[in-house]
Amino acid sequence: MFIDNSHYLENQPEDIKFLAVSNVRTKILLSLYDGPKKLAYLRDKTGIASSTIIHGLGQLENKKWIVRRGDNSYITSKGKIILLNLIKIMQKLETIKKQQIFWKNHNLNGIPLKLQKNIHMLSESYLVEVKLDNLEEPFTKYLELLSNAKNICAVLPVCFSRHTDAIQRILVNGGFVKLILDKDILKQFIEQFNSSDVLKFVKVGSLEIWVVPDNLEVACVVSENFASLGLFFENGVYDTSCLLMGHNISALDWGNSLFQHYKNLGEKMDKTAIKQMESRIKI
């Protein structure tokens, strides 16, 4: 569904320009975020002349984004809300800039709009790319992290045998695995994993599988200590040369939200459904 947001530009052009064209006003708001400040502090903190700061304070006060009481300037509730959203925009732009090779070269259709808007949650993540002396660097790093995981939630649009082996080790060692697959990848997974083992782990509850109706366009694995993200090129080929990796809580939360999105779209596979898939594979 197309959402027309052009009315925002029509209704709030002055506020947008007010924020966008002045580093002075932005620096003042950032300086006031954690509490009231005097003019001398703002001058020393920002490196801006007192006369320029006073002018900026007056403009911000007219917007009711700050108030001045005596020698101190305070950010208002309205000003703080605007500043927090401004910080989010700056974080998103900084995230895209740091990881521009990853974001500009791939198809983002597999990432829901809500999570695209929260891309700043991946600001501390880093790229793992192929090297001339190790063309499998991303997959090697990924398997290394996977081998140390106790539990994982994964959205898998591709299924490699070494990948399946790593998942099996987690289950054999008493861990828990939750998978989102499409029908073709489920078939590959059962063929590689051994259908009787799949049934065994599903029966005891350590393996849960959901199948989505359409082909997946994103790869994401989240454990207790890492989140990885892989994407497709615009031509539909999965990019094995580059992965985005994160270890902080923000990245893990983002990855879990992506998993939950696809879980809500999928149908959970029970033993009967897996047996039916097994019989079709044998035929």
Image (tube, helix red, strand yellow):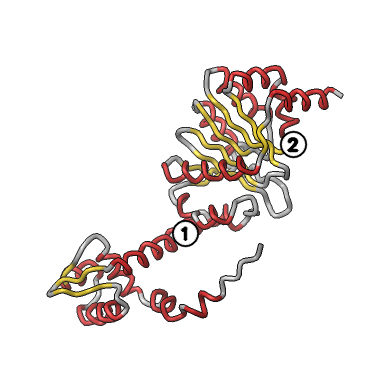
Amino acid type of the residue that numbered disc 1 sits on in the rendered structure: Lys
Mark drawn on residue 215: none
Rate crowding at label 1 as few (under 14), some (14 to 19) or many (20 or more) other CA atoms within 10 Å.
Answer: many
Q: Dot 1: what SS?
A: helix
Q: Nearer the viewer, residue 183 or 230?
A: 183
Q: Can you identify the residue that label 1 sits on?
A: 92
Q: Nearer the viewer, residue 229 or 101?
A: 229
Q: Position of residue 5 (x, y in %)?
A: 56, 71
Q: In which quarter of the image is residue 133?
A: top right
Q: In this view, does 181 lie to the left or right of 45?
A: right
Q: In this view, does 49 lie to the left or right of 223?
A: left
On screen, residue 182 above or below 78: above
On screen, residue 255 above or below 278: below
Q: In this view, does 59 lie to the left or right of 141?
A: left
Mark drawn on residue 183: 2
In the rendered structure, which disc, 1 or 2, sits on the residue that comes first in sequence?
Answer: 1
Q: In this view, does 132 lie to the left or right of 66?
A: right
Residue at screen point 61% across, 22% down: 168
Tag 1–tag 2 contact (CB < 8 Å): no
Using the numbered discs, state the Cα–Cα distance from disc 1 to disc 2 in whole angstroms. Answer: 34 Å
Rate crowding at label 2 as few (under 14), some (14 to 19) or many (20 or more) other CA atoms within 10 Å.
Answer: some
Amino acid type of the residue that numbered disc 2 sits on in the rendered structure: Lys
On screen, residue 131 above or below 18: above
Q: Position of residue 73 (x, y in %)?
A: 20, 71
Q: Position of residue 105 (x, y in %)?
A: 63, 56
